[in-house]
Image: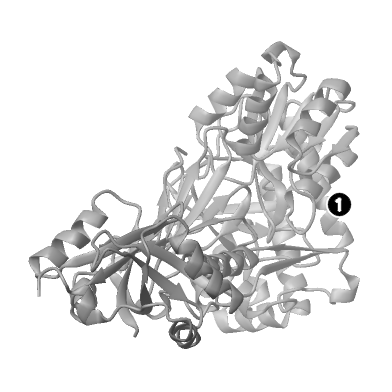
Amino acid sequence: MIFNEKFETMKLEDLKNLQSERLRALAKYVYERSPVYKKRIDESGYCLSDIKTIDDITKLPFTTKDDMRDYYPFGLFSMDSSKVAEFHVSSGTTGNPVVSGYSKDDVDLWGEAAARSIGAAGGKAGDIIQVAYGYGLFTGGLGLHYGALKFGCPIMPMSSGQTKRQIKLMSDFKPRILACTPSFAMYMGEEAHSLGFKPENISWEIGIFGAEPWTTAMQNEIDRSLGMLATDIYGLSEITGPGVAQECHLRQGLHIWSDVFYPEIIDPKTDLPVKEGELGELVITTLTRTGMPLLRYRTRDLVSINNEVCACGRTAPRISKIQGRTDDMIVIRGINVFPTQIEYALLQVEESLPNYQIIVDRADKGLDTIEVQVEIDQKFFSDEIKGIEAVKQKIKKSIEQTILVGVNVKLVEPKTIARSEGKAKRVIDNRKI
Amino acid sequence: MKITQMSVFIENTKGRLFDLCSILGKNNINIKALTLAESHEFGIVRLVVDKAEDAVEIARKNGFIASLAHIVAIEVSDDPGGLAEVLKVLSENDLNIEYMYGFVEKASDKALMVFKFEDIDKALEVLCKNKIPVISKETLNFSKN
């Protein structure tokens, strides 16, 4: 069902007027409150009066992931950190993580976006929702939680893991909606089958899955094995967690709530807009956030956009599933991992060489595994197994403390990591996504 | 006296041990004793060869991770309880053995064992005091030289 008729089905012309009005207010808001944006706008050669309609957005400066690192932790906030309601954190490309400060209004906005998403997936007030995304600094769990609260869906705040318990409570509480990463949904499906559950004994009818890339093939597989409709949700902590965009039950792309999260699709090399339907980098402006509003944030996610009004009645444009990245980020069990983080972790261990390769696989039951192969160095070769095992453990610990995901470390002989044009290929992703 | 042993890191992949042994063979290095310590993903091959320093250099040139380690070769009487007798002395003197393995060939009617000690100098002293015969490098090269 449609959660917010007024905004979700707003006529395109009215929507454009609303976006223009909000953009003008946003430009003024950040100009007055954020020294970083004030400086950038001043240097751009444009002034606030040049921002008249939403089409003038291209006159505003971009914000990048590197800005997040450079102004860590609170430098990009447009609000004093004491006024912020909560912080969320995701992986940065190297040492510093990415922080986003949500004001009370931002949390409310997030709840609104997630509630619209639950409705788009086919949920309605009164449907029990099992939230099996992690709760914490990661936005998955709380995002769906706030959305369900706003919508009036009784919440099972499970967080991730504890598969058997998840399945037991599913069979006792009979939630209609499951929200988690698609790989965890697959895993729970396998577990439920091995516990003797048939698709008809599984109460979930709607899946709201995201936080990692997945294919239509995987979606169909979840539909079939769990007897449910699996839908895709999109979000990122910098903009707002899950709920920025969501597939409706027709599953012809993800509706991006453009009255609050304005999308542009650009060519990442020229920074110019691409034609409708062409693949490009998704750039989002948070039209109404107050804690840490962002102008033209470069998500590094590659998508295409469809501005046609959907048969479901929603006028919000639809973005495709994520087709790739402009960088080499990988997503493991909902956590973003950058190869540069692994390099950083290896540099912390005296005995290791920053010569590595990351092998990502999806195990039979759907859970992602990550193996880091590190070339062993003559210098620290011990002729005892325990000596080598100790080095291996040290490397493993350093990586896990940096990326917050469990890894297998495999020590390999020197020069065995394949190099092309003298440069090693850092990531081999064997997942069929 | 100390004997030099060669240790080589081997990934658990097909043919790696063969690669190593064939390189040594082509370079006229004779293997006197060999043992393989293994873990799930890798192994360490320890070899007593006639020219350990040369062998390590050759292995490294061929892309292997190799190093030298000092070990002690001890003659153990080839009768029931022969090894236990030696171990008793070592244990009474608090000598930790990191690993040990046996020779195939013999210099006499006694069996030959290789020991890697945590403290090799203390081990040599204890062995000498207890009149346990330690084999020299020259004796080890018995078969061909």
Res. B91 image quadrant: bottom right
Q: Is residue A57 above or below residue B61?
A: above
Res. B66 image quadrant: bottom left
Rendered image coloring scheme? one colour
Asked if residue B16 can be seen in this view, the reply is yes
In percent of the image, x 75 and y 31: which residue is there? A178
Left or right of A7 in this view: A374: left
Provide residue B105's location: percent of width, then percent of height.
Answer: 23, 61
In percent of the image, x 76 and y 34: which residue is there? A118
Asked if residue A354 can be seen in this view, the reply is no
Left or right of A95 in this view: A104: right
Q: Is residue A12 above or below residue B129?
A: above
Left or right of A317 in this view: A35: right
Residue that carries the numbered disc 1 in the rendered image:
A108
Q: Nearer the viewer, residue A382 or A345?
A: A382
Provide residue A422's location: percent of width, then percent of height.
Answer: 25, 70
Q: Nearer the viewer, residue B36 or B89?
A: B89
Mark 1 burial class by Cα count in 10 Å: few <14, some 14-19, many 20+: some
Left or right of A64 in this view: A103: right
Q: Secondary structure at mark 1?
A: helix
The kind of residue on which mark 1 rests is Asp
Numbered disc 1: what chain?
A: A
Provide residue B135's location: percent of width, then percent of height.
Answer: 30, 78
Res. A155 image quadrant: top right
Indicate the quadrant containing the N terminus of chain A: top left, top right, bottom left or bottom right.
top right
Provide residue A139's location: percent of width, then percent of height.
Answer: 74, 53
Count of picture labels: 1
In percent of the image, x 24 and y 67: which residue is there? B108
Q: Is residue A167 above or below residue B141?
A: above
Q: Is residue A276 above or below residue B139?
A: above
In percent of the image, x 70 and y 16: which residue is there? A196
Q: Nearer the viewer, residue B29 or A87?
A: B29
